[in-house]
Amino acid sequence: ISNHMPTAELQALDAAHHMHPFTTNNELAEKGARVITRAKGVTLTDSEGNDILDAMAGLWCVNLGYGRPELAEAAMRQMQELPYYNTFFMTTHVPAIALSAKLAELAPGNLNHTFFAGSGSEANDTNIRMVRTYWAELGKPEKKVIIARHNGYHGSSVGSASLGGMKPMHAQGGLPIPDMHHIGQPYWYGEGGDKSPEEFGLERAQELEAAINELGEDRVAAFIAEPIQGAGGVIIPPSTYWPEIQRICEKYEILLIADEVICGFGRTGNWFGSQTFGIRPDIMTIAKGLSSGYAPIGGSIVSDEVAKVMDACEFVHGYTYSGHPVACAVALENLRILEEEKIVEKAGAETAPYLKEKWQGLADHPLVGEAVIEGLMGSIALTPDKASRAAFAADAGTAGYVVREACFANSLVMRHTGDRMVISPPLVITKSEVDTLVERAWRALDFAHKKLSDDGLM
Ligand SMILES: Cc1ncc(COP(=O)(O)O)c(CNc2cccc(C(=O)O)c2)c1O
């Protein structure tokens, strides 16, 4: 089985043996999966030789762009030297030491200690157990509740999917686990009604204070939130939201976890989303851009204060691949290149403003209700009626799916979540590639506008 096999044969084998995430496999078997064979820069190539502009950087993760040989070489060197060892039993290795030191240097404030995991979900599972252990060590074992947001996304393990606020995920498998509490999201376009964004942002932030008082401060361990909700549709909070959240977290004794799995490593125009929004977290979840997706790795960067308590006890937790040497070596090389080529700074200062101007132009399209972007993560809201910000008279996602398919037909990958289209391109995207991205998006919207009108949805 290789890239040279006919696509149909590859698709048949895939359908026979491979269960895909977040997929109705029978439908996919009917359709046949698109076989991606190669990638370079921001461009994917499929088994039929089609080049596709990957405006999603895989799954929000290939910040460095595809095809950087340095990362493969770093992996090869590490594999030859020490392909695996653990850090469980009083042992360590240079890649884990070097990466945790580098992260302490890059992370803002007093976030100087990293507990490694193999993914963002695993890192958020670490966080659930860490914040509860932290408070128990301080003599407050009742402080177990973690507050999070509806439509937040923190992963797909039992714990992390419980932190998330996605109802379809809770409906499968009996989630959430106990002591999880969800408050409203700062989604003005979809839920703000006639309120100003500023008023709405404050109102949604104050739901945190109300929840703490309703639950009792002595029961609440932490609040977890993405600086910008990614999988929820790139929901950029109103300017009043984060300052109010920060105030509340400081007023009450609860830990603040910033989930930077998407927002980290340059995505919002700074190294971390916490810097973009002036957030001072006690714990920061990282993954994705940490290695640009070239190797699976995640982690929790933890403040001096939290580490001081956690270091005094045995935290009875860890994964076989916590701090995997090859994944750490790839992540280190990824960060070295991001730093050396000033990719985060250039993306924030040059690419982001250009992309913002082009992206906001989409708001002129009849199908688009708003076009928002921060750094290099953006979204558009699809609507049949701009003035009222109305939803379509069909299941959420129907229009989004039509646009997504139209994008693929125009050699562009954009993700839809509900009836919002999202982008999160590699940070190395050039201005001419931005032009191509927006041109193809516009063409896809035109096609979808016609189809939705023909289907009576516009
Ligand atoms: C904020 C956040 N936190 C945690 C995770 C979980 O990370 P892992 O997947 O590595 O366990 C994520 C992951 N985000 C994610 C993962 C897969 C698909 C999509 C999508 O938007 O289609 C988004 C995420 O976006």
Image (cartoon, rainbow, N blue to C red):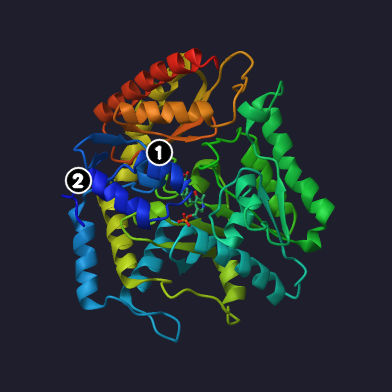
240 vs 304, left or right, is right
Residue at image coords 21%, 38%: 48
Percent coordinates x, y for residue 216 in the rendering: 83, 58
Q: Secondary structure at mark 1?
A: loop
State the residue in front, 147 or 276.
147
Lower sequence index among marks 1 and 2: 2
Residue carrying label 1: 424
Q: From where the camera sits, is residue 374 visible?
A: no
Residue carrying label 2: 6
Compared with residue 271, is residue 453 higher up or lower down, i.e. above or below?
above
Residue 360 tag number: none
Residue reaching furthest to the bottom: 90
Percent coordinates x, y for residue 105 in the rendering: 40, 60
What amino acid type is highlighted by mark number 1? Ser
Residue reaching furthest to the left: 4
- Give the CA separation, mark 1 to mark 2: 31 Å
| Screen quadrant of the N terminus | bottom left
Q: From where the camera sits, is residue 330 visible?
A: yes
Percent coordinates x, y for residue 213 in the rendering: 83, 52
